[in-house]
Image: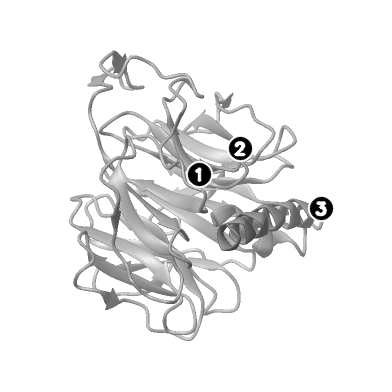
Amino acid sequence: MKIEKAIKRSQSRLPGYWLSFRLIFSWIAIVIFTLIINGCSKSNPLEPVNDISGQTISKGNNAKIAFASNREGNFEIYEMNSDGTGLTRLTFNSADDREPAISPNGKQIVFESFRDGNWEIYVMNSDGTGLTNLTNNPAKDDGPCWSPNGSQIAFVSDRDGNSEIYIMNEDGTGLTNITNNAAKDYDPAWCGKQIAFTSERDGDPDTFVMNDDGTGVTDLSNNAAFDFDPMWSPNGKQIVFSSNRDGNFEIYTMNADGTGILRLTYNGADDAEPGWSSVTNQITWSTARDGNYEIYTMYPDGTGLTNVTNSSAVDVDPDFGK
């Protein structure tokens, strides 16, 4: 899961976070062992809400969520409706498939896979057909996301010696390193002509933003805590992210300029990997609050908390369809 990757990338600088990873790993091990041997409040589903742009969106709308789950023994890509119905398995491979991202038109899903013996970026149709390896490189390539018009994909690679953010065309051509920094850069999220991302260039993981050509780099969170995994609101005016600034990983939002930070979750378990839907005006994320990682949704004010997977497996890496 992304929280695990971020901790791994940073554990040499932040050894205290290694303990958190060990605890997470222990929870996952317990879930797997259990598989081998053996009530949240909801708002009125039809009640209209205003998104941050003032647009009225019905809570009765539905959207697709792609995610990764090990419910069949290893991590595969699944898709479901945002209320948890319509669960469909999309990949069938003995290697792990992780971090799916649904294209803006909903017709394709890009994801990372270990099926070639290292992490590569793949794309497939939304029904699981048409599988194509886009990177085909011995380096580690992971964490893909789409450009707003679906013509390009941003992702993370260590092919130049450390984690950098690259962009490529949707067919894998036109590869460009847009960070070119000695520090680790990861977690890209694209909105308009900007990319939000996590960087350790100020000594600890912070949420940054840059133009999609790599210029105009700005530290938005500028905090000694671990701030990572940013995702944009539908209108680009806010960013949702995960941070342990209050003791454990929780979900926060902030304005696109870094002001107005608001904490949305309050739980002793880790909350991470947020995404934001323009269809339902909901935030989705993964949380360990039920003893294993599950996919939850809520509204941008923290209300309407709902577990949409309810599985004994590990369900992570959620992404909302646009």
Question: Nearer the observer, disc 2 or disc 3?
Answer: 2
Location of residue 232 with respect to 37 vertically, above or below: above
Image quarter hosting the C terminus: top left
The residues tagged by marks 3 and 1 sit, at their Cα atoms, a distance apart of 25 Å
Image quarter hosting the N terminus: bottom right
Question: Nearer the observer, disc 3 or disc 1?
Answer: 1
Q: Counting residues from the N terminus, which is met first, the one under dot 2 or under dot 1?
A: 2
Residue indicated by mark 3: 16
Q: x, y (%) of residue 108?
A: 22, 60
Q: Counting residues from the N terminus, which is met first, the one under dot 2 or under dot 3?
A: 3
Closest to the observer, 262 or 313: 313
Residue 268 shown left or right of residue 114 in the figure: right
Residue indicated by mark 2: 289
Closest to the observer, 308 or 301: 308
Q: x, y (%) of residue 302?
A: 49, 23
Q: x, y (%) of residue 79?
A: 30, 52
Disc 2 to disc 1: CB gap under 8 Å: yes
For the point 74% across and 51% down, the residue is 20
Mark 1 Cα within 10 Å, few/some/many (few <14, many 20+)? Answer: many
Q: Identify the mark at residue 214; answer none if there is no mark.
A: none
